[in-house]
């Protein structure tokens, strides 16, 4: 019976192709809008996570000062060792010092960021070496004049020369290039993560920043163990540093801890909320499409009143007539849902190139959108179908 009702529904749709197209256009737009927005939203979320992950795995940054851009009393090497030995869940830790100086090689020059740290930093910040090597712990202890450069520096200063083993002048001193990091591009808070030169922090302190009375660590880069809650690490660091910096009671901290995972969670949560909101707004057009289906089905019932009367007169039951018109409404909605998914697929492929996010095909949202379009057919097709089923055969036969 359902199969016969489906055949009749397809015949009626083919008989009035233009009207059927105009009927389902609302469903097509609604499904396409919902699927496109949700897909782009998930792509944006994935992009944000990727950009933050470029900064490092489970990265925590301990900085002096109350705010991210504020400055304060730097940390001592004893502070570094205390965090390394007394804080649970710390996988890696590296002191970090920054400076700025003009870098020159032959006739090429560039004003660049110099980062002083230890070997651990390359693991913490997920740096891969494309050419050469990192400096060693012995070179850190000896304050050796060695450097690992970023891909941008390599292109600007060594466009036609292998930089490994070359002497690069940094301000009034020079360093030997021992490695080149793999390109990261833009990420985190930096426009170009590859526009940097990484040297042993002991070398940077001695040659560029001065000892600062032994308290020369500008900040610490900390990597948490996988699966260990970073919130617990942050709480323990706060407690330890307040004790070591003699901050008691309600006094404000003169340091701050940046948690990349917490930032990623907040941004991801905000993106999901916005995506859901936009998806819900786009879903309103599905309801508009459903109203269009209901209107056309009511018109169809009126046009086919005599046909309904004949069917009822020769023995068709009311539920069979109801099923026929309900199947027709559902068929229209499903066609609109399939067409909407196809349109969304094309739109997503085009828009991800414009907005710069990956295309993440999610079968769940596509199936959900299709199921909702079918539900719209049931919801808005039931009233016209019920009206057709309740027609009196004699009155229907008299209808002109």
Image (tube, rainbow, N blue to C red):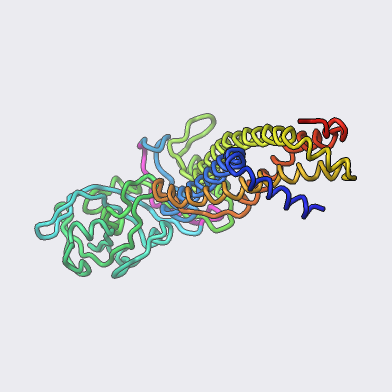
Whether the magenta-drawn stretch holds residue 256 is answered as: no
Q: Tell how many labels.
A: 0
| Residue pictured at 76% horizontal, 34% vertical | 384
To which quarter of the image does residue 67 belong? top left
Q: Can you give x and y, in whole percent of width and height, for residue 267 in the image? A: 50, 42
Q: Nearer the viewer, residue 134 or 384?
A: 384
| Residue pictured at 17% horizontal, 58% vertical | 157
Q: Nearer the viewer, residue 32 or 103?
A: 32
Q: Is any part of residue 79 visible from this angle? A: no
Q: Can you give x and y, in whole percent of width and height, for residue 291 in the image? A: 66, 32
Quadrant where the image shows the C terminus: top right
Q: Can you give x and y, in whole percent of width and height, for residue 197 in the image? A: 27, 56
Q: Is residue 400 above or below residue 222?
A: above
Q: Is residue 224 above or below residue 35?
A: below
Q: Nearer the viewer, residue 118 or 198?
A: 198
Q: Is any part of residue 226 visible from this angle? A: yes
Image side of residue 289 versus residue 320, left or right: left
| Residue pictured at 47% horizontal, 37% vertical | 246
Give the farthest residue toward the left.
Answer: 107
Q: Which residues are magenta?
A: 71-90
Image side of residue 328 versus residue 146, left or right: right
Q: Nearer the viewer, residue 134 or 307?
A: 307
Q: Can you give x and y, in whole percent of width and height, for residue 363 in the image? A: 61, 55
């Amino acid at each position: 019976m359902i199969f016969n009702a489906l055949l009749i529904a397809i015949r009626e749709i083919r008989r009035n192709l233009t009207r059927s197209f105009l009927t389902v256009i609302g469903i097509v737009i609604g499904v396409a809008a919902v699927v496109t927005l949700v897909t782009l939203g998930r792509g944006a979320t994935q992009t944000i996570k990727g950009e933050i992950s470029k900064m490092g795995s489970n990265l925590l940054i301990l900085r002096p000062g109350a705010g991210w851009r504020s400055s304060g009393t730097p940390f001592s090497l004893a502070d570094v060792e205390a965090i390394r030995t007394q804080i649970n869940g710390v996988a890696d830790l590296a002191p970090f010092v920054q400076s700025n100086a003009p870098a020159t090689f032959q006739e090429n020059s560039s004003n660049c960021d110099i980062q002083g740290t230890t070997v651990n930093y390359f693991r913490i910040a997920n740096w891969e070496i494309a050419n050469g090597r990192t400096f060693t712990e012995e070179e850190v202890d000896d304050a050796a004049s060695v450097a690992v450069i970023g891909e941008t520096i390599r292109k600007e200063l060594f466009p036609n020369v292998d930089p490994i083993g070359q002497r690069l002048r940094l301000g009034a001193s020079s360093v030997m290039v021992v490695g080149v990091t793999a390109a990261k591009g833009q990420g985190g808070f930096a426009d170009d993560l590859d526009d940097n030169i990484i040297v042993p922090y002991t070398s940077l302190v001695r040659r560029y920043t001065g000892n600062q009375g032994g308290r020369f660590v500008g900040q610490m880069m900390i990597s948490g163990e996988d699966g260990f809650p970073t919130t617990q690490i942050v709480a323990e660091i706060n407690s330890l540093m307040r004790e070591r910096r003699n901050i008691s009671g309600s006094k404000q901290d003169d340091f701050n801890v940046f948690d990349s995972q917490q930032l990623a969670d907040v941004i991801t949560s905000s993106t999901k909320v916005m995506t859901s909101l936009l998806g819900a707004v786009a879903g309103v057009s599905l309801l508009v499409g459903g109203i269009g289906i209901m209107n056309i089905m009511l018109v169809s019932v009126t046009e086919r009143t005599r046909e309904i009367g004949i069917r009822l007169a020769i023995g068709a039951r009311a539920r069979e007539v109801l099923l026929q018109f309900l199947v027709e409404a559902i068929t229209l909605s499903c066609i609109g849902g399939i067409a909407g998914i196809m349109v969304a697929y094309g739109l997503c492929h085009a828009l991800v190139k414009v907005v710069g996010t990956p295309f993440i095909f999610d079968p769940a949202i596509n199936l959900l959108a299709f199921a909702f379009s079918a539900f719209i057919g049931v919801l808005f097709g039931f009233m016209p179908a019920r009206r057709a089923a309740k027609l009196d055969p004699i009155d229907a036969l008299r209808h002109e």
